[in-house]
Amino acid sequence: MRRFVRDRIRARFSRGNRDFDRCGRELAEAALLGDLDSMLTVLDPLLRMHVSVGERTDDPSEKHFSDLLSSLLASVGGMIRDFRFHPGAGESAATVLFTSGNDAPGTGVVLNMKRARNPAELTCSARDALGQIEAKVCGEILSSMRCRSYYAYGLAFCGKHCEVVGGTRQKVAREA
């Protein structure tokens, strides 16, 4: 199943698919501006049209969503740089980090993803994902990426539904 979904994503979202590239750019732009509504405007139709994931609780759908998000962001070329993906282990969420390719000193983005058990838990799961970012030591990674500030987002997915919270610009903590 996992190979099928991966192959389907690759075929549908290849470099030749300009609509997918446009969606990736719009998602990256929205994330770099703290624009939650625009992020959902990009993600919602993509989930409904292109991702075939059941809503069973034993379905490893978090992996499918992180693959979709990684594919989206990989399609934007030089608009972003320092792209890093850290898959979750067990109950932890998958995390994506990247910086703006357009400004120096960089603005970073941290996206933490979790799978909700049902659509009613989307907002709570997204807040949990955001809380995990705040609890992690991201300052060292962001500093190594030459970031002075960053936007943090919690994303929760359930079937073909998603929720995004966060989007407040924060300063990167520097060690004394």
Image (cartoon, rainbow, N blue to C red):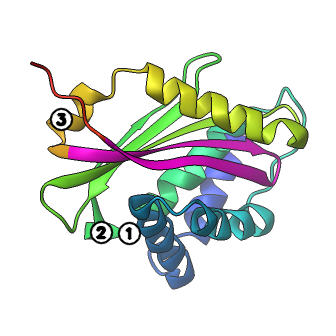
Quadrant of the rendering where the N terminus is positioned: top right
Start and end of the magenta stretch? 148-170
- Front residue of 127/94: it is 127
62 drawn magenta = no
Residue 90 placed where, x, y %? 62, 16
Rendered position, 13 above or below 165:
below
Q: Could you tell me the amino acid type at mark 3?
A: Ser
Q: Name the residue under label 3.
A: 143
Rendered position, 60 above or below 40:
above
Could you tell me which secondary element the residue under label 1 belongs to? Answer: loop
Q: Mark 1 points at which residue?
A: 76
Residue 30 placed where, x, y %? 48, 66
152 drawn magenta = yes
Near mark 1 (Cα within 10 A), the count class, few <14, some 14-19 or many ≥20, is many
Q: Could you tell me the amino acid type at mark 1?
A: Val
Near mark 2 (Cα within 10 A), the count class, few <14, some 14-19 or many ≥20, is some
Q: Mark 2 points at which residue?
A: 79
Task: Tell me the distance, in whole angstroms, between the alpha carbons under discs 2 and 1.
Answer: 6 Å
- Residue that protrudes farthest toward the left in the picture: 176
Q: Could you tell me the amino acid type at mark 2?
A: Met
Task: Tell me the distance, in whole angstroms, between the alpha carbons under discs 3 and 1.
Answer: 23 Å
